[in-house]
Amino acid sequence: MTNRFSTGLLALYTVLSATVFQQAFGIESEEDVYAFDDFPLEELLQHPDWFKKSFLELPSDLQEAVDKDKRGIIVYFGQKRCAYCKMLLEVNFGLSDIATYTRRHFDIIPINIWSTEEVTTLDGEVLTQRDYSLREKTNFTPSLIFYDEQGKEALRLRGYYPPYQFRAALEYVADGHYRSESFPDYLARGDSGTAFEPGDLNEEDFFIPPPHNLDRSRFPGQRPLLVYFEQGNCHACDVLHSQPLRDPAINELLQAFDNVQLDIRDQTPVITPNGDKSNARQWAKALGLFYTPSLIFFDEQGKEIIRVDSVVRFYRLRKVINYITSRGYLTEPNYQRWRVDGGF
């Protein structure tokens, strides 16, 4: 299995060459998937015509997928003006190998997070699409929940991920790896043969230097805490620091936080916000992180408020930071409901 995964991943890197991206999408290179304009779209998005035309009765949808010898269904939570959804639909699904593999193994059922049309969930509850989205805490679109043949949740993705990680997610579920290992462990196993040498992290003046005693259970902080999990030789991390964090409005908002940067692969000691002794690598694993950069927001007492663990650009990052600095989470702990009710 390991050799198969590593070979497939390397082959995918070849597929995602600069030439392919430029010819197919007008993108200069694969790296540019991290540098798009994420402001709400002017033109409404359309789903690929191969998405399932569902009556929104998920138990029936799952049974039909199983009857066609598929591995299950993917419930896609999106919205029509979402730039991140556009990247998934047009870039990821625009690659023939990803589209073909997805169609072979899954049926995709689209859910509009704003719709009042009803959906019957896999547990038999009848909800509006909006309430279903809120119940599942799909804070960011696109969000995808993978359900296996028995209707068990196999994987959940929040936000947009670049093609190679998305392809790995499809294989992780289709090949049944979710039954025996976590997705971060699966990715780490596949990356072992292609990992780059460690590199320096990007520095910011507002980062608090080590040692990192982040214990807020016994010693509440004066400000919310923002922990950046990053790694060296990480292009997405470079983009975060060279673009969104350089934005004057975002930079000013970040002054209201205690900002701490950790290397997701490092064993630097850290005391976590709930007082546990750990190190950066172990803590990242306990949090289930696999993407860098991942930004985790905690309140003054050390409780996690929200995390951004997928591709993030200017508009989304500003909104999340505003959610924290305005203390919107105190009156509405559900970020998506806060957005729906006018917080955005």
Image (spheres, grey):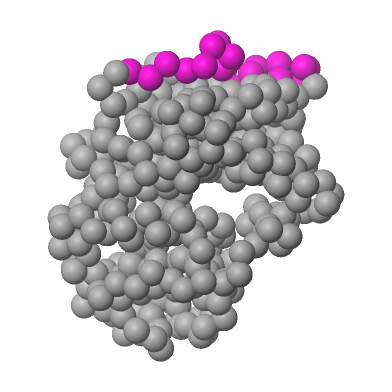
Residue 36 x/y as whole percent: 35, 39
Residue 15 x/y as whole percent: 64, 36
Find out whether residue 203 is within the magenta segment: no
Residue 67 x/y as whole percent: 78, 17
Q: Residue at x 15, y 57 (%)?
A: 248
Span colored in magenta? 44-68
Quadrant (top left, top right, bottom left, bottom right) of the C terminus: top left
Asked whether 88 or 65 is in front, the reply is: 88
Tell me if residue 277 comes above or below residue 114 in the rendering.
below
Q: Is residue 298 left or right of residue 285?
A: left
Find residue 62 and report its image quarter.
top right
Q: Residue at x 56, y 17 (%)?
A: 51
Find out whether residue 56 is within the magenta segment: yes
Tell me if residue 82 comes above or below residue 218 in the rendering.
above
| Magenta stretch: helix, strand or loop mostly | loop
Asked whether 216 or 284 is in front, the reply is: 284
Residue 229 x/y as whole percent: 45, 66
Tell me if residue 241 comes above or below residue 179 in the rendering.
below
Tally of numbered tags: 0
Asked whether 263 or 29 is in front, the reply is: 29
Q: Is residue 141 shown to the viewer in this render? A: yes
Tell me if residue 131 comes above or below residue 294 in the rendering.
above
Q: Is residue 258 shown to the viewer in this render? A: no
Q: Is residue 176 left or right of residue 116?
A: right
Residue at the farthest front position = 19
Q: Residue at x 70, y 46 (%)?
A: 9
Q: Residue at x 18, y 68 (%)?
A: 256
Find residue 304 and report its image quarter.
bottom left
